[in-house]
Amino acid sequence: MSLQHNHGAAVSGTKSERKLKALTESLGLPFIKQRLWGKTLFKPPKHWSQKTPTGKQRKFIADGYIEVPGKKDIIVEQKHSDKHGTTEEKVFYDLKKIEFGVYGKEHELWYVFTGDASQDIEVYKEFATEAKRLKLPVKVIWGFEQYKKELEKYIKEV
C-alpha cells in the first residue's frame, strides 16, 4: 500500500534527512532527532513573540544534532531542493535567527544545502554570502558529498 502525499517537498525533505542521518551514522556518530532544548529545540529571540496565540512557548526545531566526542557538538539545518520553489526565501529568516543568537554559541551550527537544484538557487548563495559578510557562526556546506567530507575532517581534527 502506498501513501499519497499532497506535499512533494515534504516527501523530498524526509528522504534527504534520512540520507543525511545515514551519512552521519556511517561515520559512527549519532544523528539525533529527539526534541531537546538547546540541541534541537530553540526559543525565539526575546524581542520576538515568545508565545503562540494559545499561550504555548514558540520554538524552532533543528533538523538534527550530532554528538561529537571530545569536540563541540553540531546542530544541523538542512535545506533540500531538487527544483526551485517558494520555500527558498525562508533562509533569510534563518539568517535573522542566527544573527539574533537563537542557536547559542555552545555548539557548531552547520547549514547543509542539498539536492539537484541547491547550488543553482541564488537565495542559497546569498545566504552563504550574507552569513560570511556578517561573520555569523555558521558553516555552509553544499551537497551530501561535501557534508560527509566536512564531518570526516571535523572528527579527525585535534
Image: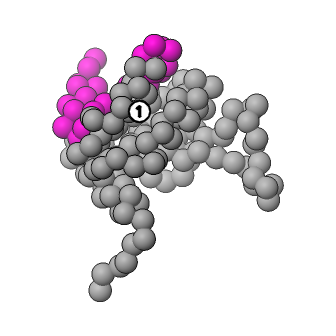
- Rendered image quadrant of residue 10: bottom left
Q: Residue at x 75, y 32 (%)?
A: 46
Q: Residue at x 41, y 39 (%)?
A: 76
Count neighbours of disc 1 (C-alpha within 10 A) and say few if under 14, some if 14 to 19, many if 20 or more: some
Q: Residue at x 29, y 86 (%)?
A: 1
The residue most toward the bottom is 1
Left or right? Give the position of 39 relative to 128: right
Place of residue 13 in the rendered image (x, y in percent of width and height, measured from the top left): 36, 55
Along the line of sight, the residue nearer the viewer: 99 or 73:
99
Along the line of sight, the residue nearer the viewer: 11 or 55:
11
Along the line of sight, the residue nearer the viewer: 135 or 57:
135
Q: Residue at x 49, y 53 (%)?
A: 34
- Give the extent of the magenta segment: 131-158
**Helix, strand or loop status at disc 1:** helix
Indicate whether 90 appears above or below 125.
Answer: below
Q: Can residue 90 be seen in this view?
A: yes
Place of residue 138 in the rendered image (x, y in percent of width and height, measured from the top left): 44, 25
Which residue is identified by label 1?
123
Q: How is the image coloured?
A: one colour
- Rendered image quadrant of residue 98: top right
Indicate whether 31 appears above or below 146.
Answer: below
Q: Is residue 20 visible?
A: no
User: Within the magenta stretch, is there residue 97?
Assistant: no
Quadrant of the snapshot with the C terminus:
top left
Place of residue 27 in the rendered image (x, y in percent of width and height, measured from the top left): 22, 41
Could you tell me the amino acid type at mark 1? Val
Could you tell me how many numbered marks the image carries?
1
